[in-house]
Amino acid sequence: MTSSHFADRLQARIADTSPVCVGLDPQIRKLPSGLDHSPEGVAQFCHGIIDATHDIAACVKPNLAFFELLGWEGMKIFWDICAYAQSKKLLVIADGKRGDIGSTAEAYAEGYLHENAAVDALTVHPYHGSDGIRPFIDVAARNGKGVYVLVKTSNASAGELQDLPCGDEAVHEHLAQLVESWGAAHFGPKTNLSCVGAVVGATYPEELKYLRTLMPHCPFLIPGYGAQGGTAADVARGFIPDGTGAVVSASRSIIQASGGSDWQDAARKAAETMAAELRKVLSA
């Protein structure tokens, strides 16, 4: 049972560890040597990455696509590793990018954010507007969970839609103001941050800096660090001036740090390096 506010719980975990979020994107063909290229190998790999990084990272972000690809076995592995991560005191952000309206949105929300779910937050997309987001927020707020709304994503073609003009601003800027307003009734008593967060990519540092001013009460999930080109200096722009309010996600640079038998040691070292880089820029 989840009893505390998501943002408060997340920030307490960050204070004990670092703002590192380890992306779990397991691909069978890229599993390191010594592991079977099978669902069982995926399970072993994810457990191994959690074991290697659980005392460094604040959270993990399992990408549902790589588990859905494996059918029912993959979904069983997904829920198993979510529960295992929580047992190691990691928060779990399910990267599902879910979104719909009405009873379908409610079903997605209840499926991933119910009171006893081994998930602490879910990524959602806002294309349907507020009535596609409200069911997720309502369930999350009721159960001490969080949602992260896609605002400015890290991929190269994001601007094809997200940068279109919308009056005197871009679409992603207008969306950011909506996200801030959606979360205004759900601030944590300890952090003054909402359970409604935003996904903003490290690959657009200037936009990241401005979007922080538009969403001062939203926890940020910042992808794009490492393999996609984002640096510690880039992501620092997404934090609140006191150095709180965000986690930074890295997948390939950690989980694929080595394809050999030393894959756990390599993942741990990569996470340690990332944590040190973030601490350095945030302390400055």
Image (cartoon, helix red, strand yellow):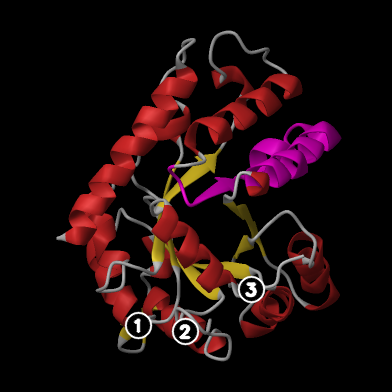
- Vertical placement of 186 versus 227: above or below? below
Task: Report the disc number at residue 4.
Answer: 3
Q: Name the mark nearer the viewer: 3 or 1.
A: 3
The stretch in magenta equals 56-85
The residue under the point 58% across, 27% down is: 48
Q: Amino acid at mark 2?
A: Glu
Q: Nearer the viewer, residue 107 or 99?
A: 107
Q: Find out whether the residues at labels 3 and 1 contact each other: C-beta distance under 8 Å.
A: no
Observer able to see residue 229: no
Q: Which residue is mark 2?
A: 180
The image quadrant where one finds the C terminus is bottom left
Q: Is residue 1 left or right of residue 137?
A: right
Pointer 3 or 1: first along the chain: 3
Pointer 2 or 3: first along the chain: 3
Q: Amino acid at mark 1?
A: Leu
- Report, in whole angstroms, how far the alpha carbon at label 1 lies from the one at label 2: 7 Å
